[in-house]
Amino acid sequence: MALFATISKASSFLTRPSFRRFHLRCMSNVPENTVYGGPKPQNPNQRVTLTHLRQKHRKGEPITVVTAYDYPSAVHLDTAGIDVCLVGDSASMVVHGHDTTLPITLDEMLVHCRAVSRGAKRPLLVGDLPFGTYESSTHQAVDTAVRILKEGGMDAIKLEGGSPSRITAAKAIVEAGIAVMGHVGLTPQAISVLGGFRPQGKNIASAVKVVETAQALQEAGCFSVVLECVPAPVAAAATSALRIPTIGIGAGPFCSGQVLVYHDLLGMLQHPHHAKVTPKFCKQYAHVGDVINKALSEYKEEVTNGSFPGPAHSPYKINAADVKGFLNELQKLGLDKAASAAAAAAEKIETAESPNGGIPTSD
């Protein structure tokens, strides 16, 4: 009977809601009951999904997108409630210092994707397919897209252009079960053909091509299309012609949403290919670069004049008795000079920390 009572009590405890919550928290390998199941709990009401984007688009609510490349910026996007974080191949320029987006590799992109995925838990995460990783065949395109999701932790991929081969690649990736964002207008990976970073849609033929290409990407199964550096009326026409949201960058106010690069909108730095000026379409919401430069200059000055680190930033202490014992041990080792340095440092710290800074007081 005693054994039965013990088992009954244990059974009762195991069925309590408090235990179940504790148990689930500890069992980090138990997926959450959502499409984003995994080791870290996800709240389906907070995580942005394609369904959320479609709902916003249907209601006419603008979609916010920011391009970011690392953990700290991803955390900022998460805190700010940005809808979509794009891990762009523009990291080639903004982070790696190249003049174009072409040099960045898939392995480098995956590093950026993983860092962002660790920081941004709310936004939909979209990773760019870098140049040279999806053009050869649909098999190559699908394989690259799979890696972006499996190894990079992204929710979707973005690819540039609207040539027949790109449309075919987009369709194949969608059919493989991967969400695709298209990109038309100025497509930086095609600067060899475009003759540089040139706006598109500025004449009749080019404007019509922007709209038709966006439609083709929609028919291929893309959930959204980026419109880059095209006149506002052209972007408005494309947005009206499509059933999926358009995301503008330098395309005027008539798109379904907007995207800017994190570093650009914060005024952190300038792209080399823009002759060290911010892109014309970018609004700087802060001048973080100036703050950074000022902070670095002050740091350099304080280190140079010896005011940093002071007592407030030298937090680790050793008591007087241990200092004395330490000095004795140093002397036994024949390190008299080191012992003198330690003694002088201890005296200086003690003086700096005294209420009057070591200045004698008069009675």
Image: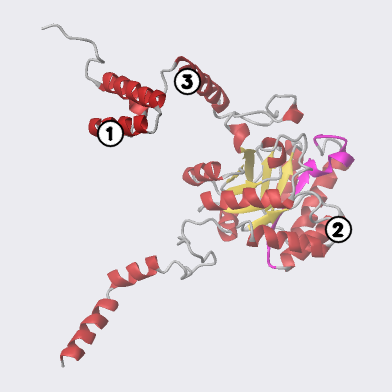
Write down the residue under mark 3: 303
Q: Amino acid at mark 3?
A: Val
Could you tell me the amino acid type at mark 1?
Gly
Find out whether residue 348 is within the magenta segment.
no
Q: CA distance from mark 3 to mark 2?
A: 54 Å
Query: Which residue corresponds to mark 1?
Result: 325
Q: Quote the CA–CA distance across marks 1 and 2.
A: 71 Å
The answer to whether residue 294 is left or right of residue 133 is left
User: As rendered, which of 346 and 304 lies closer to the eye?
Assistant: 346
Label 2, secondary structure: give it. loop
Q: Is residue 266 above or below residue 156?
A: above
Using the image, determine if residue 131 lies above or below residue 282.
below
Residue 245 location in percent, x, y?
66, 51
Crowding at dot 3, Cα within 10 Å, few <14 / some 14-19 / many 20+, comes out as: few
| Closer to us: 14 or 80 | 14
- The answer to which of marks 3 and 1 sits earlier in the sequence is 3
